Amino acid sequence: MRTVPGPTDHVVVVGAGLAGLSAALHLLGAGRRVTVLERAEHPGGRAGRLDLHTDRGTYRVDPGPTVLTMPELLDEAFAAVGEKADERLDLVPLDPAYRTHFADGSTLDVHTDAAAMEAEVRRVCGPDAAGQYRRMRRWLTDLYEAEIDRFIGANLDSPLDLLGPDLVRLAALGGFRRLGPQVARILPDERLQRIFSFQALYAGVPPHLALGAYGVIAYMDTIAGVHFPRGGMRQVGQALADAAEAAGATIHYGRTATGLERRSGRVSAVRHGATDDPAGAVERLACDAVVLTPDLPAVHRIVGRTPRRAVPLRWSPSAVVLHAGLARPRPEAAHHTISFGAAWESTFREIIDDGRLMSDPSLLVTRPTATDPGLAPDGCDLLFVLAPCPNTERGPLDWARVGPAYRDELLGVLAARNHPGLGELAGDVEISRLVTPADWAAQGLAAGTPFSAAHTFAQTGPFRPRNLVQGLANAALAGCGTTPGVGIPPVLISGRLAAQRITGSDVGTPRVRTRG
């Protein structure tokens, strides 16, 4: 593994998102002095915070990810400084992890427990499907075991680093064949196929085209389990930041990195200024090494150049998100609901190939107040409705005009499907906030997508943008644009991998256990 040469006593981490805070904790655990620069006034990055105020009180919104899996990786980060996740977070396991509704009127709850899920599959899909589910669970677990150490949790300097028994094992499992057909061979029921393959869209690729290796995301969702922190997802970033500061890190909020100073091919200082005064005074922060965690276009601006690629990066689809405060509770709705339309592969063609909105959308609806009622005023409820959509490169829509109409359309779709607790919402919405690709783009996210570079074969593993910066001997990257990729688990791992590039140490890398 290539590591940063020379002194690395003081490391500046740009960004107090989950990747940056993970890196900071692992660096602190390896004995480094750490300073973090964060442009917002709070930690968390995309897993930040949004408060919607009404006369009834405040809705505490999670504007970023709402699904938390693999909490063991949080333990790994906290353990680097001698702490435990449960000392700073109250993580609630969700059961069901998801409630899924289908166009034929059937409903299936997704359970982490194998026996409970087998019983649910037998109830909805029949006895043959129950045995097929067991096969799927074994396959996903085997995929995870083959991938976690060599392909997900390790720094890669070359495709040759992949050679070994794990590569042979992954190939034998079908990791380099297409995910959709692999799942279909095990699970003939189309409803189950969707449940165990829709996660590929998080990686920016439709299930029928994604590598089988990305079944590991379904492992994280359906076997490792889904959790929710009381107080909202914002608590994750806050807890990591508090642990970092307790271990000696200094975090400066409201500071935007604007550039780097160089000396003999090394970063000698990070230039930064007040976020709310971009034309104001610029300060310098001397350092021995730097970890850059913003989205790739922002990293390239800070570095001062964009690396050349034979083929330009392909960006993931984006999403429209509606945050809605409801004046009355909807206790029938689960914490996470997936509402599948009748269409499937055609929806991916619409948003990825055609640059159009889904004509028959599948939606993720999150009701965090199902687990923590305190996130909404008394007697109220909070909903998050996510609809995948084209990014701004594939579908340059006029979101100022399209957005309000699409909001009404999404509410109309849920009303027509009339899932328990989710029908006829419009009359109960007392406050809302719509987030579109235009808003993601305004935050500096490439192609207006919060999911960064798609996980195509040419952008996976050693072919993804590397976490070392060419021409700068002491700079590393972390975050969803680099290895291993998109999602809370990969982002937490990316912080540890960046720290290892600087320290050359295996400190804080215990094996993450599996569940079968």
Image (cartoon, rainbow, N blue to C red):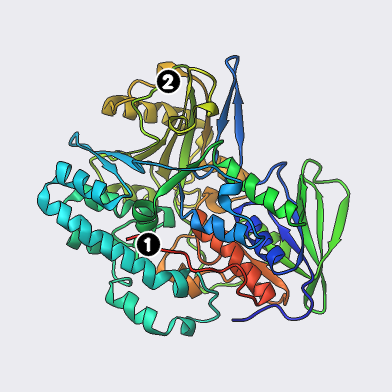
Does residue 171 appear left or right of residue 271 in this picture? left
Quarter holding the C terminus? bottom left
374 up-or-down from 446: above or below: above
Q: Secondary structure at mark 1?
A: helix
Location of residue 238 in the rendering, given as x and y in whole percent from the top left corner: 65, 45
Query: Do labels 2 and 1 touch, CB within 8 Å?
Result: no
Of the numbered discs 2 and 1, the one sitting upstream in the chain is: 1
Q: Position of residue 15 (x, y in %)?
A: 68, 54
Q: Disc 1 residue type?
A: Val
Q: Nearer the viewer, residue 485 or 377?
A: 377
Q: Which residue type carries mark 2?
A: Pro
Local secondary structure at mark 2: loop
Circle 1 is placed at which residue position?
216
Q: Residues within 10 Å of mark 2 (few under 14, many from 20)?
A: some
Task: Give the x, y percent position of residue 498.
Answer: 63, 68
Q: Is residue 44 visible to us here? A: no
User: Residue 102: which quarter of the image?
Assistant: top left
Residue 329 is labelled as 2
